[in-house]
Image (spheres, grey):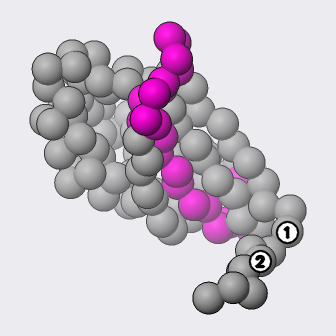
Amino acid sequence: MERWLLNVETNCADPSKEKEFNKWYDTIHLADILETPGIVRASRYEKSNPAEGQGKYLAIYEIETENLDQTMAAFGERVNKIIEQGRMSELAVILGAHLYKQITAPIKSKRK
């Protein structure tokens, strides 16, 4: 089974509504995306000082699949369904999305 990361960089369209944006992303959107077969975990991060044109937020979706093309097709279908259901926030501005294939197993620090 292959392991992948899908990293999605976003900004909030209205900085005065970032609390609302983050609540939607954390309580609604991540759960909606995790309905996609093969996407097994999701987490989000905030960049402390993003430069102009960079995303302030990063969502990382962990994928475990035998067939990435099939998983990404299901992901696209899921996103379309979310949009059709009106569950996508107008505050979400996607700046980029990138896939990374895991090429080495995680290594833990020997320090405690």
- Which x, y percent locates residue 75? 51, 46
From the image, tell me which residue sits under label 2. Answer: 107
Query: Is label 1 or label 2 in front?
Result: 2
Q: Are marks 1 and 2 in contact (CB under 8 Å)?
A: yes
In which quadrant of the rendered image does the C terminus lie? bottom right
Give the amino acid at mark 1: Thr
Residue drawn at the location 66% of the way across and 36% of the way down: 98
Quick check: is 61 in the magenta stretch?
yes
Residue 54 is tagged as none
Mark 2: give few (<14), some (14-19) or many (20+) Cα within 10 Å.
few
- Which x, y percent locates residue 4? 69, 57
Q: Along the horizontal axis of the image, is 26 left or right of 65?
A: left
Give the amino acid at mark 2: Ile
Residue 104 is tagged as 1
Q: Secondary structure at mark 1?
A: loop
Residue 33 higher or lower than 16, as above or below: below
Q: Which residues are magenta?
A: 47-68
Quick check: is 49 in the magenta stretch?
yes
Residue drawn at the location 52% of the way across and 54% of the way down: 61
Which of 92/2 is in front? 92
